[in-house]
Image (cartoon, grey):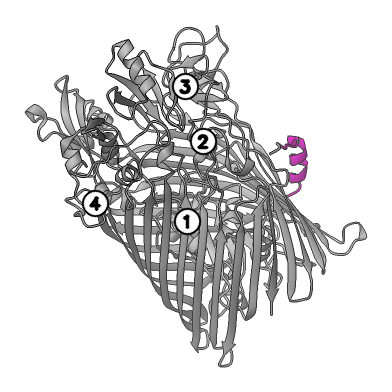
């Protein structure tokens, strides 16, 4: 792969006269004040988007605005909202709409199929979820037609891959707190998918794709149909989609990535372990060797240190790099490195169906029902092998090569230290399947009170999500430990432990690639870890909106309503992970005395536990819009306010509110807007009712008695958690002058502060916080008073302890030039940018200091993130160029950069380092369409045109920012009749 970059000034020149990816499709009617260009209306003030009944609006065709619950006309919401129309989504030519939305600069830290590919136990493999402002997917509310969707993970986050995508008419991204309007989780903002529920006709899409390396083959098939019957009173819409993306598999041992990619070079952050010699504690180096194990075995301690084992079981002199710092060396034999084995992109298969029927039983009143059935399957390889350093091998092990036995005798030793990548065991695979069953029924419409029109919306949803995780080809640690401790019994290799032999132990030869099938079947059983999760979400919602009277400057508008929601989950795991008391042994997982009966530590990874939990929520909200003035001299202004009271069955009552307004100033096209809000995020099912995990801590320090004691650590949920509280403020302006109707500009400053952030604590921290009287509620989480250790425990739980504060600004701009240089068609320049000024996290723990993550490219919040698009369109073809860029950053802002001989004393809060620059990246995408007929369009797209490599990183790579796939080619055909 080749690197590619352009000067920042070039990118700046592209952006200057531009934001607003917000464009309404030509079939829609532009809202008042938004001029229509030659190719349809161009939306610059995304908060004012009107939607006609033909575009999927409610019966009566009222205004639909995601940032507010008020649905009457003539109202401008103060919360900045970016809108992506169906045409823009189609132009990006992605097999999953998630990728298109996640490219927006304000979305930072979203997941997807390139994230969590190295994970076995998280349950988030292949999960497509959005994160606004970098505060995490759990603080970003994702809606479908303004309604909640059942979670696809115990954190409550839905999977966008399960959404119907061909019928998406637009996506509204609300960049700011919206808890007063929509309830919990809308702290970073809201992503709302609006479907075209009035679509008529037949349309489809066929897409194929492949990378320049010949992998991640993609095929997408989409078909939708809609019709109206009974004098346009009965509306039927249905769609079905199939998407198969092969993904990018893991590479080989060493530094060789899949199919010829060469950007991984073992770049690492090495801790010298010296704090005060004037040199940096941490040094950044390339081609770093892990000297604790070899691919097929390495003796790591004793007089035989440095003896490696090849695939045939023959000893050889292992080449250590130099110098070495602990177990890390520079250069040398890197054949045992396992990191390149992780999947670069999970394989994903999506099957999705959606149907809606709506009937206007009376003019302006519709009863409707929707059914969304979907399945997503993903698979990934977390890493190569199953490395095990720090083993002790007895010299009398019959599998030890004779040459090594001879050297043992000569050296007078009976055992030696050993480490292996366990290449002979093969590689682990994680398969995840999510199935969603979502049903909605409702009635909505308009009614009059006197001469005033009101709207109402009553609906109920029932959502079920089943998540099945299966891990294959993974070893059981206790069986491995028994199987490698081998003796000669009656002239044959046998497990040393008689109890293990009686339980079926088979001796494992870890010297080379010569393990017997019987031993492999014992250590790596056919049935691996599994987790079966069932989640349900039930919602009943009723809301009203209208303008009860007129004031001096216009109608006074209100919206009010209530909602009930119930969330439930149940998770069951295999006996070897959950423990025999929770999931009894069976024919597939027979009882084994070698294993830990509690399930802890049995599997190499993927230790899942049983659990269940439920909570309910009752809410009521009121929102009002007060027109302040409307005159030629001073312009037009309104004040918007909302309040929501929420009663959680687990934590009680909490309030959310917002106050904001807009002012259309006398300056032509110049509008000022601002809003401040109190937003909330309630603890999710996982945080409240986490499946318990038990661990023994044999030498735990008790500060009350100043002694070490035996303690049982119980990792559990915390039903005493309270909602996180946030204060969100945005202030900005939009500019769309009448003399230049094709120019749109907006700027918004934001400041988001979250307190009582739910975060996990280590057992020692829990005890210390009580001992120091810093967090008295932790005192109920442990008991160390039992002599001898029997009965001592520490419950490791999450607490409302940390805080997050971030601020920055967003820029959006667009410029449309009809008939540029006299050519037919139009040229459109668009751009969006987000600058993160600071992103400060504070753990709340004594002895720690807040850390600013803004500009840390190891995370999700670079200083700058831009998206720029230039498109040229005619009646017969279109061309598109898109640039994606984020700025240079650091590995972490806590580090002090210094040169040898000039470094201060390194501390845990301000460690020293010799290099702390993690460069940004610049990506270019190109696309084109050709209209073969009025109904059929041929299109093509190339992403990452210059095949840009990720930057060297000590965390392998950060797929939240960097593209690790390389150049991708896509082509397809769309049709509509």
- Kindly report the distance in space between the C-alpha atoms of the residues bearing marks 4 and 1: 24 Å
Q: Which label's residue is closer to the chain start, 2 or 4?
A: 2
> Do the CB atoms of the residues marked 2 and 4 lie less than 8 Å apart?
no
Q: In terms of sequence position, does the residue under pointer 1 or pointer 3 come before the other? A: 3
Residues at circles 1 and 3 in contact by the CB criterion of under 8 Å: no
Which residue is denoted by mark 2 in the rendering? 253
Rendered view: 302 above or below 209: above
| Mark in front: 2 vs 3 | 3
Q: Residues within 10 Å of mark 4 (few under 14, many from 20)?
A: many
The percent coordinates of residue 950 (x first, y second) are: 62, 37
Q: Secondary structure at mark 4?
A: helix
In this view, the mark in front (2 or 4): 2
Q: Which numbered tag is attached to residue 316?
A: 3
Specify the label residue 852 is tagged with: none
Q: Helix, strand or loop at disc 1? A: strand
Q: Earlier in the sequence, mark 4 or mark 1?
A: 1
Q: Mark 3 to mark 4: distance in Å? A: 42 Å
Residue closest to the eye, 624 or 608: 608
Please indicate whether residue 580 sits to the left or right of residue 361 in the image.
left
Estimate how packed mark 2 is, as few (under 14), some (14 to 19) or many (20 or more) residues with alpha carbons within 10 Å: many
Q: Position of residue 651 (x, y in %)?
A: 27, 52
Give me the C-alpha separation between circle 2 and circle 3. 18 Å
Q: Which residue is mark 4?
A: 575
**Residue mark closest to the camera, 1 vs 2:** 2
In this view, 665 is above or below 319: below
State which tag comes first along the sequence, 1 or 2: 2
Q: Which residue is mark 1?
A: 378
Residue segment shown in magenta: 4-18
């Amino acid at each position: 792969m080749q690197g590619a970059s352009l000067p920042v000034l070039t990118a700046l020149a592209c952006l200057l006269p531009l934001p607003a990816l917000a464009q309404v499709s030509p079939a829609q009617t532009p809202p008042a004040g938004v001029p229509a260009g030659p190719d349809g209306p161009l939306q610059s003030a995304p908060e004012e988007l009107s939607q006609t009944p033909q575009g999927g609006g409610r019966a009566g065709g009222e205004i639909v605005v995601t940032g507010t619950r008020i649905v009457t006309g003539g109202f401008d919401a103060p919360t900045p909202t970016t809108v992506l129309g169906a045409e823009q989504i189609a132009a990006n030519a992605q097999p999953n709409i998630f990728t298109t939305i996640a490219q927006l600069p304000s979305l930072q830290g979203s997941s997807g199929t390139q994230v969590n590919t190295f994970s076995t136990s998280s349950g988030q493999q292949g999960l497509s979820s959005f994160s606004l402002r970098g505060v995490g997917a759990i603080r970003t509310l994702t809606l479908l037609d303004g309604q909640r969707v059942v979670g696809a993970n115990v954190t409550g986050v839905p999977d966008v891959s399960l959404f119907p995508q061909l019928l998406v008419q637009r996506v509204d991204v609300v960049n700011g707190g919206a808890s007063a309007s929509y309830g919990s989780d809308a702290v970073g903002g809201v992503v709302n998918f609006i479907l075209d529920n009035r679509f008529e006709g037949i349309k489809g899409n066929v897409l194929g794709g492949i990378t320049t390396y010949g992998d991640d083959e993609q095929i997408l098939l989409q078909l939708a149909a809609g019709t109206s019957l009974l004098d346009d009173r009965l509306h039927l819409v249905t769609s079905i989609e199939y998407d198969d993306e092969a993904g990018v598999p893991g590479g080989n041992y060493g530094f060789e990535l899949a199919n010829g990619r060469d950007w991984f070079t073992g770049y690492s952050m090495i801790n010298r372990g010296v704090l005060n010699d004037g040199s940096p504690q941490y040094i950044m180096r390339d081609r770093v060797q892990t000297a604790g194990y070899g691919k097929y075995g390495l003796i790591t301690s004793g007089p035989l240190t440095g003896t490696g084992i090849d695939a045939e079981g023959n000893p050889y002199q292992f080449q250590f790099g130099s110098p070495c710092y602990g177990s890390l060396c520079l250069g040398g034999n890197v054949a045992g490195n396992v990191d390149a084995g992780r999947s670069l992109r999970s394989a994903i298969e999506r099957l999705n169906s959606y149907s809606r029927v709506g009937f206007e039983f009376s003019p302006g009143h519709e009863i409707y029902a929707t059914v969304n059935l979907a399945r997503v399957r993903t698979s990934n390889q977390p890493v190569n092998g199953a490395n095990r350093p720090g083993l002790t091998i007895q010299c009398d092990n019959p599998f030890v090569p004779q040459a090594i036995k001879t050297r043992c005798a000569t050296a007078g030793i009976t055992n030696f230290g050993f480490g292996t990548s366990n290449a002979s065991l093969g590689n682990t695979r994680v398969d995840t399947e999510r199935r969603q069953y979502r049903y909605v029924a409702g009635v909505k419409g308009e009614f009059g009170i006197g001469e005033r029109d009101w709207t109402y919306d009553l609906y109920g949803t029932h959502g079920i999500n089943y998540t099945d995780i299966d891990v294959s080809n993974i070893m059981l640690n206790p069986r491995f430990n028994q199987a490698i401790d081998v003796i000669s019994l009656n002239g044959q290799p046998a497990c040393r432990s008689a109890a293990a032999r009686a339980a079926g132990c088979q001796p494992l030869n870890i010297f080379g690639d010569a393990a017997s099938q019987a031993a492999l079947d014992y250590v790596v059983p056919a049935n691996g870890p599994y987790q079966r999760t069932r989640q349900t979400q039930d919602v009943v919602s009723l809301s009203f909106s209208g303008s009860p009277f007129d004031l001096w400057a216009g109608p006074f508008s209100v919206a009010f309503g209530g909602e009930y929601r119930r969330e439930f989950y149940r998770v069951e795991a295999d006996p070897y992970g959950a423990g025999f008391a929770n999931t009894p042994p069976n024919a597939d997982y027979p009882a084994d005395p070698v294993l830990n009966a509690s399930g802890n530590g049995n599997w190499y990874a993927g230790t899942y536990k049983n659990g269940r939990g439920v909570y309910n929520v009752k809410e009521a909200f009121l929102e009002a819009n007060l027109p302040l003035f409307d005159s030629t001299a001073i312009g037009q202004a309104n004040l918007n306010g909302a309040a929501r009271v929420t009663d959680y069955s687990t934590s009680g009552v909490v309030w959310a509110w917002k106050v904001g307004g807009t002012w259309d100033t006398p300056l032509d096209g110049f509008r000022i807007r601002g809003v401040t809000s109190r937003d909330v995020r309630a603890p999710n099912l996982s945080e409240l009712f986490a499946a318990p995990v038990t661990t023994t801590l044999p030498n735990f320090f008790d500060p009350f008695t100043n002694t070490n004691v035996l303690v049982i650590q119980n990792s559990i949920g915390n039903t005493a958690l309270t909602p996180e509280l946030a204060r969100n403020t945005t202030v900005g302006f939009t500019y769309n002058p009448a003399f230049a109707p094709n120019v749109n500009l907006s700027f918004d400053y934001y400041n988001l502060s979250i307190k009582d952030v739910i975060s996990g604590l280590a057992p020692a921290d829990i005890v210390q916080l009580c001992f120091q009287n810093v967090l008295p509620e932790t005192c109920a989480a442990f008991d160390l008073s039992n002599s001898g250790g029997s009965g001592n425990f520490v419950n490791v739980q999450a607490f409302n302890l940390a805080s997050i504060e971030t601020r920055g600004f967003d820029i959006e701009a667009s410029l449309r030039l009809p008939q540029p240089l006299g050519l037919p068609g139009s040229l459109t320049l668009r751009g969006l940018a987000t600058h993160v000024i600071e992103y400060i996290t504070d753990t709340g723990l004594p002895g720690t200091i807040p850390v600013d993550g803004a500009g840390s490219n190891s995370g999700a919040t670079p200083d700058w993130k831009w998206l720029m698009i230039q498109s040229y369109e005619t009646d017969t073809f279109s061309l598109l160029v898109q640039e994606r860029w984020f700025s240079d950053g650091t590995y972490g802002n806590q580090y002090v950069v210094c040169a040898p001989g000039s470094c201060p004393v390194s501390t845990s809060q301000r460690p020293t380092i010799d290099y702390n620059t993690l460069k940004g990246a610049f990506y270019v995408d190109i696309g084109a369409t050709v209209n073969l007929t009025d109904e059929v369009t041929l299109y093509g797209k190339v992403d990452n045109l210059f095949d840009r490599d990720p930057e060297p990183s000590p965390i392998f790579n950060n797929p939240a920012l960097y593209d690790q796939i390389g150049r991708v080619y896509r082509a397809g055909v769309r049709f509509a009749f």
